[in-house]
Amino acid sequence: MSELATFRAETRAWLEENCPPGARGPGQVPTGSTKVKIEDADTRLWLERMAERGWTAPMWPKAYGGGGLSKDQYLILLEEMRRINARAPLMGMGTSMIGPTLLEFGTEDQRQRHLPRIIRGEVAWCQGYSEPNAGSDLASLRTRAEDKGDHFVINGQKIWTSGAHFADWMFALVRTDPDAPKHEGISFVLLPMDQEGVRVRPIRLISGASPFCETFFDNAIASKDDLVGEMNKGWTVGKRLLQHERSGIESLAGGRSRDASRRSLSEVAKEYLGDDQGRIADPMYRANVTQYQMNSEAFRLTQRRAVEEASDGKTPGPATSIFKMYGTELQQQRSSLLVKLRGFRGVGWEGEAFTEEELEGTRTWLGERAASIYSGSNEIQRNIIAKRVLGLPD
């Protein structure tokens, strides 16, 4: 038996024994936030067991508590999780964004202090990038960080800060040299959210939810030990982090596709349109659902191939903009299809006449209108693909 075959057999046996029933199928996936309670005992147990094995961050080095898996071993782990419908034990900006960035750009001290806590699910992170006058043109940011020797004093405002009201730490781009050219004079810093100088105000969206926030800094403090990369050279670090964010590769760790926490479109369609010997009764919607499912699976396999082809399993470069652009379009297609499949029951806002799932579907459909804007709009992604992937002229 080859080494990989042995690893697969051992992984399958361990998952069967250690993945609790409550961690299979739909349910909560922890982010590590100390402000969000893990409601289900099985979800907590699953996080603890996977963290102990290092499989909350399977390919991170064992020196920081990661799994130390090779790329091939990681892909086997994903296949075996998918086989038993296991949810990801942990997900969020810690594992998908700042962790990989610290592995590339962080000091050894920063890695030792921050990575083990991320792996154990003890901390949640948020991203301090966009500002009221610096969205797509991010390099125009004005949040100022003054060098005070062993720390920075930060003043300014960030906006669209996803999950800031639940986050324990923030990674942020700040201006440390206001006289430098726009893309220079920017530094990348880490700072705790629970301090007097940080104030968070959630933004209520059309969906009724408030996943995004305004974040205000009034003499907030970031330690000099938490400057990532060189002073005034943070733009390079910030751009690389965006590639980690846009890759969507973390979604592979859910054991299934992006839809792991929800019923399939086929199930919903058969409920509302009827079941014709195991098929969706309406031929037009049957074709629409089939096309979506084919596209979604092709997207998942493309992400997997990118992992297989990447050097040492690292996040790809500019090609990640393809994942961001197409992934958000898939999200929007799915939520729109759900609304159409349910007919008038797909546009309920409140009331006992609608089920909880129907109401959630309406709000998701509205909320996901933003998906092609945040994390860099799809227009920005197309520009990056044209220039950096296809090599087209400006």
Image: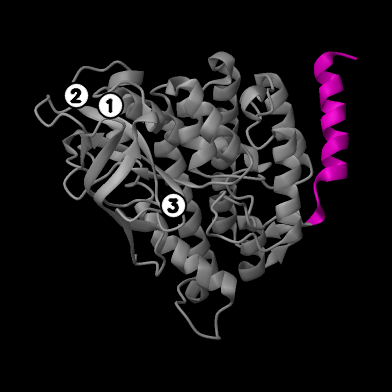
> Residue, x 48% and y 58% (percent of image)?
335
Q: Amino acid at mark 3?
A: Gln
> Residue, x 42% and y 24% (percent of image)?
319
Does the magenta stretch mainly form a helix, a strand or a loop?
Answer: helix
**Residue range of the region highlighted in magenta in the rendering:** 1-21
Per the image, the residue denoted by label 3 is: 332
The numbered dot on residue 235 is: 1
114 or 235: nearer the viewer: 114
Nearest to viewer (mark 3 / mark 2): 2
Residue 378: quadrant of the picture: top left
Q: Is residue 196 magenta?
A: no
Tell which circle, 3 or 1, labels the residue nearer the N-terminal end. 1
Looking at the rendered structure, the secondary structure element under dot 2 is: loop
Per the image, the residue denoted by label 2 is: 184
Looking at the rendered structure, the secondary structure element under dot 3 is: helix
Quadrant containing the N terminus in the rendered view:
top right
Nearest to viewer (mark 3 / mark 1): 1
Q: Amino acid at mark 1?
A: Trp
Quadrant containing the C terminus in the rendered view:
top left
